[in-house]
Image (cartoon, rainbow, N blue to C red):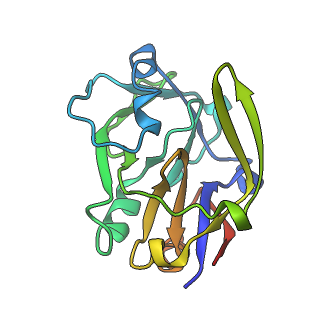
Amino acid sequence: MKYYLLSYDYENDDDYIIVTANEVAEKYNYDMFKGEHLESWDNDIKFYYTKDDGNMLTDYLATDNRWLVVSQKFRNVIDKIECNSIQYLDIKIINKQTNDTNDTYKVANVINVLEALDLENSKYDIFELGDEKIISVEKYALKKERIQNHHIFKLKGDTIPVFVSERVKDIIVSNNLLGFAFLEVKVV
């Protein structure tokens, strides 16, 4: 099975709405990239947009904080195959001009974290930040035996990117979900 790095579709987003988080969201920026279940969540997190930011709410919304914000349609199709890997967190999407509020979108907190990065077959750089060595991966290679039977996950030690199986990609594409892009990664 093939695997993909999931990203926002910047190439086709000319009319897609881009949303901006309120200040309440800032206190969760670090937590959202840890890949851990959140025990507490502030239900006053809001994302704002205007018509200047686009006209179309997609199934994966572009956000200023790079969170994975997804539609009800995404949740309906993905939860059929992968319900234990994602914690959905309540937010509100608000049109600043009309005050129309949409509460059907959720932050998808991917909590399935795997030790599956194959550094030997990946392309990466190492740089130091104080006492810490940071690995910056340019091209990912994943360990096949560690990702089998997993459909959506993050990598231990690199929990910002989200990876999906070919099955998830096919479901997203066949259901015409908008806002998603996929970059195939090497599996060894």
Q: Is residue 176 above or below residue 40?
A: below
Which of the 4 quarters of the picture holds residue 51? Answer: top right
Q: Is residue 170 above or below residue 30?
A: below
- Please state which of residues 29 and 141 is positioned toward the viewer in this rendering: 141
Instruction: Give left or right: position of 179 versus 92.
Output: right
Instruction: Give left or right: position of 42 versus 129.
Output: left
Q: Residue furthest left?
A: 39
- Which residue shows up at 48% across the image and 50% down it? 156
- Please state which of residues 57 and 173 is positioned toward the viewer in this rendering: 173
Q: x, y percentage for residue 121?
A: 72, 68
Q: x, y percentage for residue 96?
A: 50, 22
Number of callouts: 0
Instruction: Give left or right: position of 15 versus 102.
Output: right
Q: Is residue 23 above or below residue 109?
A: above
Q: x, y percentage for residue 146?
A: 46, 71
Q: Is residue 120 above or below residue 69?
A: below
- Please state which of residues 168 and 132 is positioned toward the viewer in this rendering: 132
Query: Split into 4 quadrants, where in the image is the N terminus?
Result: bottom right
Which of the 4 quarters of the picture holds residue 163? Answer: bottom right
- Which residue shows up at 41% across the image and 53% down it? 71
Q: Residue furthest top?
A: 23
Q: x, y percentage for residue 137?
A: 71, 50
- Please state which of residues 171 and 73 is positioned toward the viewer in this rendering: 171
Query: Split into 4 quadrants, where in the image is the C terminus?
Result: bottom right
Instruction: Give left or right: position of 127 versus 102.
Output: right
- Which residue shows up at 74% across the image and 47% down it? 14
Q: Residue furthest front?
A: 131
